[in-house]
Image (spheres, rainbow, N blue to C red):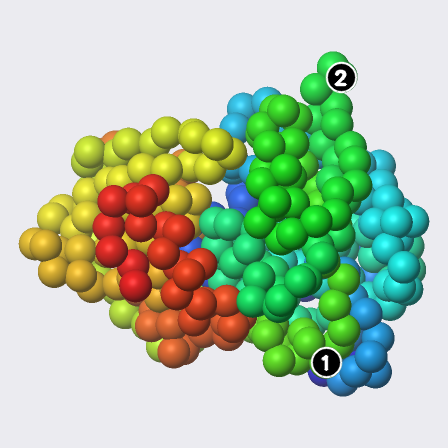
Amino acid sequence: MARTVLTAEMVEQAVYGGAILGGGGGGWIAQGLEKGRAALAKGTIELISIDELNDDDEAVCVSLVGAPAAKDQYVDDNQLLMTVELLQKNYPGTIKAIMTNENGAATTVNGWLQAALTGLPVIDAPCNGRAHPTGAMGALNLSEQQDYVSYQAAAGGFGSHAISGFVSGTLDYVGNVIRRMSVEAGGMVGVARNPVSVAYVKAHGAVGGISKAMEIGKAFLAEKEGSSKIEAVTAALHGRVVKVGHVSGFELKTEGGFDVGRLDVDGIELTFWNEFMTLEENGERKGTFPDLIMTFDAVTGQPVVSAEVKNGQKLAVICVPQSELLLSSTMKNERLLRTIEPVIQKKIV
């Protein structure tokens, strides 16, 4: 791919493929379709290969930060645009392109609206080719850069809960501030953050990740029957169906801007922290984040994110080894992965 003008068909492919690569997180399908279509209505959006830019050009990551199940979340178009404008106003460099933080139903199309409104292109290189829970996991291993200064702008919330601002400082500190802003905004904020060089994206990002989501989405949408959709996706990802069965013991709590919980599917136990983290059968580990663990409605074939699972629902559970995914260098960072363990009370590393 060199330069591609995005279309309505590509929106649908990107959203469904993103939902699957979201691994239980990354937002809702309806939300992603609405966002993508609204972005196309605002103007022309170009998806470009990373090779279309110079290595010293700089790109900014855009994302949504918060809990997908939060009932009072609100982020509008003006707030999303505001994040890019606030960042550019306070950042000493010049932004040449936009990139999303991860693949997910709503996150694969992150930045499309901002691209339509600003004229900046979207790079076919998300920070991570699957969804992940923490901001640091979508920060291209900038956490390992000594004395790195993070620049981030955020906006979201409605009425008296509306909030916006620019923050700079250490990556962990700024990430915690943005996460707290999402809580104060009712559960979600839009963010523009951490401008980096194209050369750095090539070394640490998921180059080709948006095209990959579209490829998976195309395979999914080409099939009519639920079981055929699941089989097509599993084959395209070189994964496997681990179990088809009914949900019991589903638990979900929203804590600190995250959805946390567990469920059983006919003897298979899954835990999640926004995204599905572990998959065990009779105490034996069958999948561990960043392996892609994903659930589908066994009848319709629709991807089911962690926050919309229901007790009694019949699901198909798939698992794709991390070796088959386009991933950020953060997915090999043991320090970042260990932050999952106290949340789900399971070993990850």
The residue depicted at 46 percent of the width and 37 percent of the height is: 258
Q: Residues within 10 Å of mark 2 (few under 14, many from 20)?
A: few
Residue under numbered circle 1: 199
Tag count: 2
Q: Where residue 148 appears, x then y in whole percent?
A: 68, 62
Label 1 element class: helix
Labelled pair 1, 2 in contact (Cβ < 8 Å): no
Residue under numbered circle 2: 159
The residue depicted at 31 percent of the width and 44 percent of the height is: 342
Quadrant in which the N terminus appears: bottom right
Q: Where residue 301 appears, x then y in whole percent?
A: 38, 53
Distance from disc 1 to disc 2, alpha carbons, whole Å, reads: 41 Å
Q: Amino acid at mark 1?
A: Ala
Disc nearer the start of the sequence (1/2): 2
Q: Residues within 10 Å of mark 1 (few under 14, many from 20)?
A: some
Q: Is residue 110 left or right of residue 287?
A: right
When the figure is inspected, residue 19 is found, relative to residue 70, above or below; the finding is below
The residue depicted at 79 percent of the width and 41 percent of the height is: 166
